Amino acid sequence: MTSSLRETFTVTDQYGIDPLSDVRDNDVSAIGPEDTTTLVLGQGYAGRPDLIALDFYGDDNLWWVVQMFNGIVSYQDIVGGMELTLPLPAALTSVLASAGTTEDINTDKVYI
C-alpha cells in the first residue's frame, strides 16, 4: 500500500528538489503486497508507532516505517483496533540494506 501523503506534502526548492526527501521513503513505499502483513492493533498501541516498530521489527527507531507505510501523518492518528499494513521484516531489511542504511532488523521475531 503506497500513500499519496508524500506527494501531497512535498515541498520543492527552485530546482524541483525536495530537500527533506529520503531515499529510504521511496524504496520502502515500493514494497509490494506480497511482502506485507496486516495487523489489528490492541489498545496498548494507540499513539505508539515506536512500540509497534519495537514489537514487530525489534527496533523502535523504525517508527517512521509504521507511519509512512500507512499514510499516517501524526502518531495521534494511531488508535486501538486500527488495521495497519507493514512490510515483513525480511523485505524491509533488504530494502534498507540496498538504500545503504545500517538498521539491523530481527527477522526471527514477528509478533504483535
Image: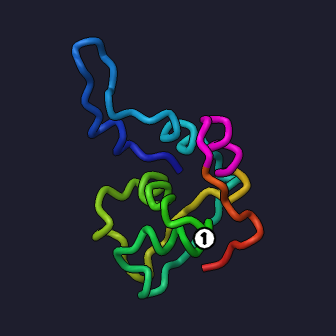
Left or right side of 102 for 71: left
Q: Where residue 43 appears, x then y in whole percent?
A: 42, 87
Residue at x-position 36% and y-position 71%: 78
The question of residue 96 being in magenta is answered with yes
Q: Secondary structure at mark 1?
A: helix
Q: Where residue 100 appears, x then y in whole percent?
A: 61, 36
Residue farthest to the right, as pictured? 108
Magenta-colored segment: predominant secondary structure: helix
Residue neighbourhood size for the residue with mark 1, other residues' Cα within 10 Å, grouped as few (<14), some (14–19), many (≥20): many
Residue farthest to the bottom, as pictured? 43
The question of residue 31 being in magenta is answered with no
Q: Where residue 16 appears, x then y in whole percent?
A: 30, 16
Left or right side of 104 for 2: left
| Range drawn in magenta | 92-102
Residue farthest to the top, as pictured? 15
Residue farthest to the left, as pictured? 14
Residue at x-position 26% and y-position 24%: 12
State whether residue 96 is above or below residue 80.
above
Residue at x-position 66% and y-position 59%: 105
Residue of label 1 = 56
Mark 1 residue type: Phe
Residue at x-position 31% and y-position 56%: 73
Q: Where residue 25 appears, x then y in whole percent?
A: 48, 41
- Which quadrant holds the C terminus? bottom right
State whether residue 10 is above or below residue 102.
above
Colour scheme in use: rainbow
